[in-house]
Amino acid sequence: MSGADHLHAVLFALRPLQNSTAKVLGEVTTDIGLSLPERAIMEVLNATGESTVPTIGRALLLPRQVVQRLADAVHERGLIEYVTNPAHRRSRLLRLSAAGRQLFDELLDRELRLLEPVADTLDPEDMAACARVMAALNAAMHTMAQQIGDPAE
């Protein structure tokens, strides 16, 4: 098998993994009324501290309008706040509110406890290598997706 064949096999395996993961982790967010896309917005803000809607859209490969609707829904729940962006008059920054930070920390803790039994069956070095490979694949595919573009944008 060529490198491209192996890569195709890996990418083909990702869809069922993503679907199963969404179902399992969705259980953590559903009982509090938070969708996985809303959680994704919070995760980006947890990682970046503050971000603009377009930047979050690029990170998640979602149109700005979709991110804005999700952010507004999370904002209405008091989980994120809009703050002045000193680098741009009209573009606001988003960041987790105190309540959002607390909820995200609780969600992450619940997710980690849920994942622990699976993690315990896997070799930590294998998981570290897998994380490095997935990060590289994500970056490469993200770049390719941006080059293709989105006609709706």
Image (cartoon, grey):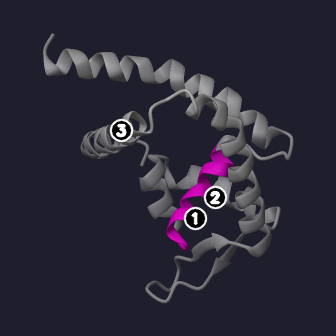
Q: Residues within 10 Å of mark 3 (few under 14, many from 20)?
A: few
Label 2, residues with CA under 10 Å away: few <14, some 14-19, many ≥20: many
Q: Residues within 10 Å of mark 1 (few under 14, many from 20)?
A: many
Labelled disc at residue 55: none
For this orientation, the residue located farthest to the left is 2
- Disc 2 marks which amino acid? Met
Q: Is residue 9 above or below residue 65?
A: above
Look at the image and give the residue range highlighted in magenta: 37-51
In the image, taking residue 2 as reference, residue 143 lies left or right, namely: right
Locate residue 18, reporting x and y percent. Answer: 54, 28
> Where does the image place residue 123, in percent across and percent down from the top left?
44, 32
Dot 1 and dot 2 residues touching (CB under 8 Å): yes
- Tell which circle, 2 or 3, labels the residue nearer the N-terminal end: 2
Q: Is 148 placed left or right of 37 in the picture?
A: left
Secondary element at image label 3: helix
Q: Residue at x 67, y 50 (%)?
A: 39
Q: Which residue is more in the foreground, 43 or 67?
A: 43
Residue 103 sits inside the magenta stretch: no
Question: Which residue is tagged 2?
Answer: 42
Q: Which amino acid, by three-letter code, is at mark 3?
A: Met
User: How far across and how far down the image is residue 107, in percent?
Assistant: 73, 51
User: In this orientation, which residue lies closer to the viewer: 84 or 127?
Assistant: 127
> Position of 31 compared to 145: left or right?
right
Dot 2 and dot 3 residues touching (CB under 8 Å)? no
Please, what secondary structure does the residue beneath circle 1 have?
A: helix
Label 3 and label 1: CA atoms lie apart by 21 Å
Look at 59% across and 85% down and name the residue there.
Answer: 84
The residue where tag 1 is placed is 45
Residue under label 3, please give it.
134
Magenta span main SS: helix
Q: Amino acid at mark 1?
A: Leu
